[in-house]
Image: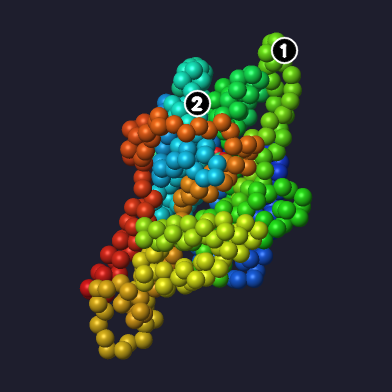
Amino acid sequence: MIESWKLRARFARRLAALYGQEVPAYLTLVDVSQEVNAEVIERLGADAERLGSIGRVSAERHGAIRVGTPQELGQVARVFAAFGMHPTGFYDLRDAAPQPVPVVSTAFRPIDRDELARNPFRVFTSMLVPQDRRFFDADLERRLSGFLARRRLFPDELLQLADRAAADGGLPGERADRFLDLATGCFALSAEPVDRAWYAELERVSSVAADIGGVTSTHVNHLTPRVLDIDELYARMSSRGIEMINEIQGPPRWRGPDVLLRQTSFRALAEPRRFREPDGSVTTGELRVRFGEVEARGIALTPRGRDLYDRVTARVDELAALDPARPRQEVAEQVWDKEFPDSEVELARRDLAYFTYRVNTDRPGDGRAPTADLADLIDRGWVVAEPIVYEDFLPRSAAGIFASNLTGKGDVHSSRDVAVRDLGWMSDVIGQCVNVPESIYAAHRAESLRRVRDELGI
Ligand code: OOG
Ligand code: NI
């Protein structure tokens, strides 16, 4: 029996092999990431591994895929369930500033700490919303929905094997191979000609709409390695002549701890694709859809910490707008230095970030007894805090990353006729509850605190 975590690890490796063949620049990105990681480990030693062992960080990837309908989302959820990857987080990119994208998204990922430690592979999965009138008028919606209803992304055999694997927690060897072949095959770039006129019509609304609804298959959009120094990586990629997006998304570089997620990407590359022309002939041309992304992960924030993050980000926007000539990074660093606690201890004491706690066995005796107050336990050295890594995504950053292959703003209208999509809606469509990331982090923390209380007898 190949257990689901092994299937997940193999799936991640197979997708990486496929994507490396299709988009060789991805391999450059991986090389540069590993080079940077090795140097950071050399420079900082054990401190560099505070948010994950070098083994995990080097192997870590996330993927991004895009589907067209609730049915397709439901099917891909069955495939990911076989890998022990569960829908987590709901992201609505349709009103994301500065560039709205006509999709809603979730991420399929492992939940349990030991599963994450075995292999943390996750896939950011977006679903098109043709019903949203800000993007699609009634006639285009009808044709787009018709087109999507006629295609089939995931064959029955794959879905049946997936259901078997999910029910049994894995698959026997031979069937595991077949399952992995089929699953990986669904995400390969198709050689099927693209209908030129149809693709162009959707592209006027959004390149993402065209990439999803303009073709009869789906494909990996990017695979993202994790890097320990994203500023260094950005500089190295740029100096190799690779055109990066303008900024690193998420928190700035600053003197305090890394929190949440910082991401950046290089602009989509031209890839040869076949086209069916209006006169029926088949030609070759190119499309710029797929890009390369890297990310640096930090500590997960509590809802209170996230509020602070959102307020600080709004403040940076405000100040940056007043002084457009000044680099955003500079503005952000200044605001963060003033407004964000710059140590793990302070983040823990003020309940701004998630940690697990364990009893400090080296605490020198001072005749006092421990109390039940967490800040007090931290202050008096009863417990040691270990940061919980942020395993999820940020909607605004995601919109910035999507922009790696957007050419213009697209045809977005204001309309009251906005299709309602939320976490509950998505849970119904998938037939599984979409997890709330903060509940998962909070449960990990609570579990560690239960042990601490037992051991200290409080
Ligand atoms: C997804 C863009 C968002 C991330 O890591 O936030 C993303 C896409 O381009 O399909 O990948
Ligand atoms: Ni991504």
What label does residue 281 carry, if any? 1
Which residue lies most toward the left here? 458
Mark 2 or 1: in front is 2
Which residue lies most toward the bottom here? 366
Quadrant (top left, top right, bottom left, bottom right) of the C terminus: bottom left
Q: Is mark 1 on a helix, strand or loop?
A: loop
What amino acid is labelled 1 in the image? Ser
The answer to whether one can see residue 408 in this image is yes
Q: In which quarter of the image is residue 235?
A: bottom right
Residue under the point 30% across and 66% down = 449
Q: In this view, does 148 lie to the left or right of 201?
A: left
Query: How far apart in space, not on screen, are marks 2 and 1 (Cα)?
Result: 28 Å
Q: Is residue 104 left or right of residue 325?
A: left
The answer to whether one can see residue 129 in this image is no
Image location of residue 227, percent across then percent down: 60, 57
Q: In this view, does 212 lie to the left or right of 291?
A: left
Q: What element carries label 2?
A: loop
Quadrant (top left, top right, bottom left, bottom right) of the N terminus: top left
Which residue lies most toward the front here? 322
How packed mark 2 is, by other alpha carbons closer than 10 Å (few <14, some 14-19, many 20 or more), is: many
Q: In this view, does 237 lie to the left or right of 295?
A: right
Q: Which of 329 and 159 is in front in this view?
A: 329
Image location of residue 45, percent across then percent down: 59, 71
Q: Quadrant of residue 359?
A: bottom left
What amino acid is labelled 2 in the image? Phe
Q: Disc 2 designates what residue?
A: 136
Q: Which of 157 and 32 is in front in this view?
A: 32
Residue under the point 33% across and 64% down = 448
Choose the circle earlier in sequence order: 2 or 1: 2
